[in-house]
Amino acid sequence: MSRDTIFSKIRSAISELDCKAEHPGFEDDTIVSSSRLGSDSPKAAFKRNFEAVNGRVMNSCDEVVALLHEQGQTHGYCDPELMESVGQRLVDAGLEVETSYDRERYDDYAFGITRATGAIAESGSLILDDAKTSDRLAALSPWVHVAVLRESEILRTIPEALGRLNTSRNIIWATGPSKTADVEGILIEGVHGPGEQIALFVD
Amino acid sequence: MVNRQPIDVYAHDIGEEKQASVLSGSASSTEKRLSALFNDYDDPNALRKLAGGIKDHTLHHLDRYLEQTEASLKRNGGHVHFADTADDAREAVLSILKERELTRLTKSKSMASEEIHLNDYLTEQGIEVLESDLGEFIIQLDGDTPSHIVRPIIHKNRREIARSFQRGGIATDYNDDPETITRRARVHLREKYMQAEAVITGGNFISAESGRVVLVTNEGNSRFGMAPSRVHIALVGIEKLVPTDRDLAVFLNLLGRSATGQQLTVYTEFISGPKDEGQPSGPEEMHVVLMNNGRTDVLASNCREILRCIRCSACQNVCPVYRQASGHAYRSPYGGPVGAVLSPILFGDKFPELADLPKASSLCGACNEVCPVDIPIPDLLLRLRDKAKREHIPQPGDLPMAPFATLATSPAIWRTAMTMSKAMNHLPIHVAPVRPLQDWLGQRTLPDWHGGDFRKWLKSRREN
């Protein structure tokens, strides 16, 4: 019933308009920030913008190990498909790595290693596609999230990324660690999601 | 005659601490927000006009886009519910929960839900609803209402929050360090997320073409709320539609920059249905409640441009009246300039009570300048003042005009009045026991009377 009422109210409201606005249309150039994108490579632009929002870019598992050691994180989760390329290196370095995420023990995972399907250079965002993430909670509840991707997967602009949303039912762009400024405008990272957001390139 | 507008009373009675919080909170990042636009674009105004144009187009063809949205959502495996009134919306949410016997929910920030007082309603029905945005969580703890669209607790300082945490049993000791406050909320809320059976969110945009519901948060609370929940309910106003996914680029770029000076909000989530088969986490059912609740009245009014609003709060932050009076002075979830236009028409049956809001503005135009969808707010405020006049709603400052007409049409009386009134400069009128005069002077300073000076000058000039 509500449906019909709403539609008839809308039609009656807009029937009184003298003229109806056309879609203005636009070129990508209007909405892409060329200063954000810069003239360097997509990876360099991604790094610059991702670091500007306090994300960390890493190019080897050793860097990840060093950070986890530094922060005293010893136990975490790794997507089984990434065990060979990433997880095993962490195990070799003395860290405990599980390949299944048990939500009953969500507090046990200090780090989570999952796939990113891409990144956006212009905004410094990681693209996490649920269909290709082993468990979305594993990319969210640990303090450190390591998103694993390849340089060739970086897209240049936001319009380009929107054009490639594909059919997945849940895609999230993560532009840095979780944050808030609710208390007196003071920036605090790691509210509900990760306090450390890492992009690890495996090429 | 009404003595004083309610909004003025709020501004007058606001405590010093609260006003300091609102003032510093709203003023603090103005430069950051502006530079985020002006450093990144050669012509940010072109972008604002483009965004306004796309919204106008969508609103002018809302029947078509709403139909398309419905079809897209269904195609994706979502359930669509239409709610014409606040009651319809509350009942739609409740029946989804009741049919599935779901009693524990988390909720991420939604202005639409504030509009219909959804939390109170569900709580009365025996359902446990927990706000998960840090600011809204604190609002709920205090039984307070949000006073800002993006930063609901802009009116509170850390000491109050620390006391609320102690009182609400979130912490056993008093600690007002913002980082500690945040960590405590993190620990408390994730336990609740994991126990929740359903999650309620709003929706920042819906793409009609794809049926993607777009949610943006900085904290990641909507994402966390959805991951362990079985049922997702998105409550979305019908004005939130955009035609295509590509159009989202315009709005996402403007929303983060205008709201907080970020290029993009940290988490931008595109949801087009329940989770994929085989995924361990994520809702099995997705429901979208498309709510009218007065929006078609706004669409039919001469202030329909306000429906372009993407709830970035930029107009609140720059408004000199908002900064002094706080969001609560606007008596609806929408404070500041957007609320001054939206609330009186959206809640149409309350127009007489809210008719003071459009008057509480100096028409300085700062709100229009920062609006990412270029809403001509000062013009709309004038249209609403006109509406109030036409509907004969009594307002302060409505002086009887007949004596003035007599004065102004009789040169002799006018001349005498001009000169005689100079005596007022020597009278203690600021303490005169005339109530309307005192109300008027309570918010203004009267300059010295110079009446008759021009005539005198002209006369002496002729004589020379």
Image: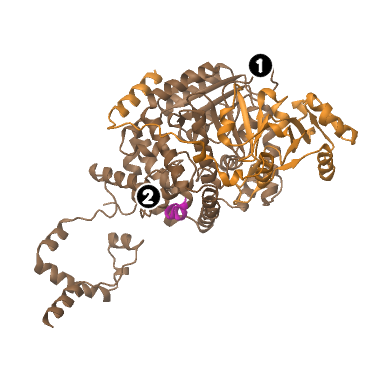
Chain colours: A orange, B brown
Q: Residue at x 37, y 46 (%)?
A: B377
Three-letter amino acid code at the position of disc 1: Glu
Q: Chain of mark 1?
A: B
- Please report the residue visible at 73 percent of the width from the left and 32 percent of the height from the top: A150
* Residue situated in front as seen by the camera: B177 or B437: B177
- A110 relative position to A17: left or right: right
Whether residue B151 is visible here, answered yes or no, is: no
Badge number at residue B457: none
Instruction: Inspect the magenta stretch and tell me whether residue B325 lies in it.
Output: yes
**Residue annotated with mark 1:** B277
Q: Residue B6 bears which disc, if any?
A: 2
Q: Is residue B328 above or below residue B320?
A: above
Query: Please, what is the dominant secondary structure of the magenta stretch?
Result: helix
Looking at the rendered structure, the kind of residue marked 2 is Pro
Q: Nearer the viewer, residue B50 or B155?
A: B50
- Residue B434 x, y percent position in the rendering: 27, 63
Please determine whether, in this image, residue A163 is positioned above or below residue B362. Answer: above
| Residue B348 falls in image quadrant | top left
Label 1 or label 2, whichever lies nearer to me, is: 1
- What percent of the width, then of the height, locates residue A173? 63, 34
Residue in view at x 69 percent, y 20 percent: B279
Mark 2: secondary structure: helix
Give whichever of discs 1 and 2 has the lower sequence position.
2
* Magenta stretch in the rendered image: B318-327
Q: Quadrant of the C terminus of chain B?
A: bottom left
How many residues crowd mark 2 within 10 Å: few (<14), some (14–19), many (20+)? some
- How packed mark 1 is, by other alpha carbons closer than 10 Å (few <14, some 14-19, many 20 or more), is few
